[in-house]
Image: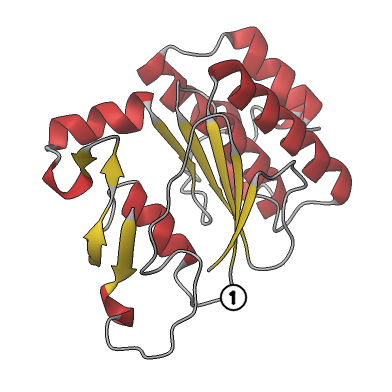
């Protein structure tokens, strides 16, 4: 990819490892994108996910230009190739923790019930499966959102500030789960941070 947010188009003296630079993201590798607030970290995730198109340049999936993909192609990519844990989580507050996970897993049919329950247990929220998301802390919601994110096949998984409200113990467990699932699928991991970052064995660290 080689891109620049349109909002930065007239900005001089821009120094970045990603913007206006040729960057290749590969499967089976782990990346960290470090950024200050307002430098386009979440925008980058939205660009690659096809959620926003207000950028200059190109994003290529293999040799396919992202801007030329049809709606049907994007549906397939998001269902089978790219998983994203949004910074703002985008959970449904009127649904329980388990229902938020099931709503995705029923679409993909990817994870077994036993695996989902094991993740709830590992992340210390087994007793929250039937709790409404809107009544859970943000840290608890982050853990639910991770489980939901992993309920699909993927070549790459993006996690946008995934541990901003987690303690070190739960951050470590989240890292273990994320690494194990990515390794199982032969997938790449791209994590973002504006300070506290998930402790993984990063192959490359980008400064946004």
Rendering quarter of residue 127? top right
Residue 158 drawn above or below residue 118: below
Report whether residue 161 is seen. Answer: no
Residue that appears at 66% across and 27% down: 129
Please indicate whether residue 178 sits to the left or right of residue 93 in the image: right
Camera-nearest residue between 207 and 172 = 207
Report whether residue 203 is seen. Answer: yes
Report the label total. Answer: 1
- Disc 1 crowd, CA 10 A, few/some/many (<14, 14-19, 20+): few
Residue 110 drawn above or below residue 17: above
Q: Among all residues in the image, which is located at the extreme right?
A: 169
Residue that appears at 34% across and 46% down: 49
Residue that appears at 27% across and 81% down: 9
Q: Position of residue 111 (x, y in %)?
A: 53, 13
Residue 52 drawn above or below residue 54: above
**Disc 1 designates what residue?**
36
Q: Position of residue 117 (x, y in %)?
A: 69, 17
* SS assignment at label 1: loop
Rendering quarter of residue 131? top right
Q: Position of residue 155 (x, y in %)?
A: 45, 28
Please indicate whether residue 60 sits to the left or right of residue 91 in the image: left
Camera-nearest residue between 60 and 147 = 60
Q: Position of residue 114 (x, y in %)?
A: 66, 8
Please indicate whether residue 196 sits to the left or right of residue 190 in the image: right
């Amino acid at each position: 990819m080689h891109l620049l947010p349109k909002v930065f188009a007239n900005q001089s003296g821009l120094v970045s490892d990603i913007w206006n630079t040729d960057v290749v993201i590969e499967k089976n590798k782990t990346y960290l994108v470090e950024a200050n607030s307002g430098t386009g970290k979440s925008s980058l995730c939205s660009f690659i996910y096809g959620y926003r198109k207000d950028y200059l340049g190109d994003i290529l999936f293999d040799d396919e230009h992202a801007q030329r993909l049809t709606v049907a192609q994007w549906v397939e990519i998001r269902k089978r190739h790219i998983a994203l844990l949004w910074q703002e989580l985008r959970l449904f507050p009127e649904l329980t923790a388990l229902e938020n996970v099931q709503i995705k897993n029923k679409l993909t049919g990817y994870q077994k019930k036993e695996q989902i329950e094991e993740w709830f247990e590992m992340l210390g929220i087994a007793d929250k499966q039937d709790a409404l998301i809107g009544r859970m802390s943000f840290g608890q919601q982050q853990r639910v959102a991770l489980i939901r994110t992993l309920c699909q096949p993927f070549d790459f998984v993006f996690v946008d500030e995934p541990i901003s409200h987690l303690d070190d113990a739960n951050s470590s467990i989240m890292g273990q789960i994320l690494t194990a699932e990515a390794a199982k699928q032969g997938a790449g991991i791209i994590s973002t941070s504006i300070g506290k970052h998930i402790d993984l064995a990063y192959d490359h660290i980008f400064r946004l």
